[in-house]
Structure formats: structure tokens, C-alpha cells
Image (tube, rainbow, N blue to C red):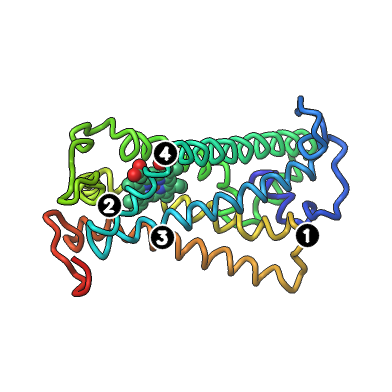
Amino acid sequence: MSSTANKESTGTSSLSSKPSGKSSACCTCSSPLLSSSIGRKWIVAITGILLILFVSGHLLGNLTIYPGPNWINAYAEHLQSLGPFLWVIRLVLLAIVGLHITCTIQLWMENRAATPQKYAVTNTLQTTIYARSMRLTGLVVIAFIIFHLAQFTWQGFNPVTRTWIDAQGRHDVYRMVIAGFSNPFVSAFYLLAVGLLAMHLSHGISSLFQTLGLTTAKLRPLFERAGRIIALVIFLGYASIPLSVLLGILRYPHVSLCPFVH
Ligand code: HEM
């Protein structure tokens, strides 16, 4: 396991904990929140909560693909109609991701410097694969997001999708998503990425309760189970879309599966 995850899962990261002696070793910022280990753990936890909210909101938006093109195209148009405010949201999201990654790297470096090799190896055996792979799953999720933005936001892989317009004159996001997932390699990559995202969230959610000082010996299994259930629901929701395209449940031209929405 990573030594960061080690400390998180052994109860050293609650608010009441004292900062480690390494607190400001790698921080150039004078903010008390950023310059102490505890402050950085809180930043990782709070930015983590905000990212979980984004991932859940984005999933709900994406699930509007099931009633048909009308819904998802209207949803996408609504987002675009936010104009400059959409850019504010994007910049805030970028700052949140940046803080989450920077503080995680700093904590990992501090823990690595503070933890004797023998201790780290011993604890590796006691932790879950979810905790051990936090850095790897985080890196793959970042790579996935860059690919995903290039595919659906910048539409760089298949620029013709920018010209796809539905009957109401809106960008045909429904058709773009179906076309994207009709490629089995793209769908396989999404399935892998959302699987790793779920692993990352599963451990992240139970750790953040600990960082916020809410975990007790009694509550720990409950939070761990909550992390797994939330991660599983997010995985199933996202994975259902490429799978539905590959199975022909979602297709273009649209065949409505819902008798009320056309
Ligand atoms: C089946 C899975 C997914 C589908 C079908 C999907 C669909 C989309 C679409 C259509 C857009 C472009 C919206 C527009 O510009 O009108 C988009 C943007 C985006 N997606 Fe996803 N998405 C999926 C999974 C994810 C996941 C797992 C994440 C994060 C971990 C994510 C993060 C983003 C971000 C950050 C944007 C950019 C939002 C913006 O600034 O416009 N997506 N997605």
C-alpha cells in the first residue's frame, strides 16, 4: 500500500491529530491550511467531496440519454447556454482537481520521507487493493479525463460530430455519444477507466470520513461499506452507457424505449 493510504487507514488523519513534524517541508505557500499536513489532508478530503458531487451530477446528466435524444441534447444545450458562467465552473473544477492532486503528492512525499521502509512493507500486507492502488487509479482517471475532454468536449478525434444537429437545431450530443461508444475499443477503455474510478472512490470515500474525524472503530465498517456502495452505483451508472450502446439498447437513429418521451 502507499504510505499515504497507510496513515489514513490507521487513524492518524482525523482533525484532532497533531500535524506531523514534516508539515511545511514541501509547501511554498504561507496559508496555514496548505502549510500543515492536517490542513492538506482536509483539502484532499474537501476537494474529494466536491469531485464526488461533480461525478454524481455528471452521471445524472448523462443518464438523460436513456429517455432519448431530446433529453440529453436539451441538457447539453442548457449547459452551453450558461456561457461565461460555464467557464467559471470549469476553472473552479480545474482548481479543485489541481489542489486535490498537489496536496496528495505532497502528503505522499512527506509520508514516504517519514515512514521507515520496513514499516511500510509490513503494513502493505494489511491493506486493501483499493488503498494500495490510489495513486495508480488516480493517474488513470486523470488520463481518462484528458481523453474524454478531447473526445466529447473538444471533439478532436472526430470533428464532424461538431456539425451534428438534431431536429430542434441543437448539437446532437446523443448521436455523438452513440457514435463514440460504437467503437468497442473506446467503450472498453471507458469501462476500464470507470472501474478504476470506482476503486479510487471506494477507498477515497471511507478515508475522507476518517480525515474529517468522523470515524470510530464501530463506524469504520459502515463507512467502508458506504464507500463501496456509492462507488458501485457510480460504476454501474457510467458503465451502463457504453454497454447499452454495444448491446444495441441505445442506438442511432433513435428507437424510443420509453413510451412517454419521443
Ligand atoms: C459513460 C460515461 C460518460 C459519458 C457518456 C460522458 C459524457 C460527456 C459529454 C457528452 C460531455 C460534453 C458535454 C458538452 O460539452 O456538451 C462530457 C464532458 C465532461 N465529462 Fe463526461 N461523460 C462520461 C464519464 C465521465 C467521467 C467518469 C468523468 C469524470 C471522472 C467525466 C468528466 C467530464 C468533464 C470534466 C467534462 C467537461 C465538462 C465541461 O467543461 O464542459 N465524464 N461528458
Is residue 146 or residue 140 the one in the foreground? 146
Residue type at the position of mark 3: Leu
Ligand 1 within 8 Å, label 4 CB: no
Tag 3 and tag 1, C-beta contact below 8 Å: no
Identify which amino acid the numbered label 1 is placed on: Gly
Q: Is residue 118 above or below residue 157?
A: below
| Of callouts 3 and 2, the N-terminal one | 3
In percent of width and height, residue 226 lies at: 58, 68
Residue 213 is tagged as 1
Residue under label 4, please give it: 83
Identify which residue is drawn at 11% across, 55% down: 253
Q: CA distance from mark 2 to mark 4?
A: 16 Å
> Label 3 near label 4: C-beta < 8 Å?
no
Q: Nearer the viewer, mark 1 or mark 2?
A: 2
Task: Tell me which numbered mark, 1 or 2, is placed earlier along the sequence.
Answer: 2
Classify residue 205 by image quadrant. Answer: bottom right
Of the numbered discs 2 and 4, the one sitting upstream in the chain is: 2
Horizontal side, residue 56 vs residue 5: left or right: left
Residue on which the image places disc 2: 73
Look at the numbered disc 4 and give the secondary structure of its residue. Answer: loop
- What residue did someone put label 3 on? 60
Mark 1 and mark 4: Cα distance apart in space: 39 Å
Q: Which is closer to the viewer, label 3 or label 1?
A: 3
User: Which badge, 4 or 3, is on the more N-terminal residue?
Assistant: 3
Question: Is residue 113 shown left or right of residue 262?
Answer: right
Q: In terms of image quadrants, where is residue 105?
A: top right
Secondary structure at numbered mark 1 = loop
Disc 3 to disc 1, how far (Cα)? 30 Å
Q: Is mark 3 within 8 Å of ligand 1?
A: no
User: Residue visible at 75% across and 42% down?
Assistant: 118
- Which is nearer the N-term, disc 1 or disc 4? 4
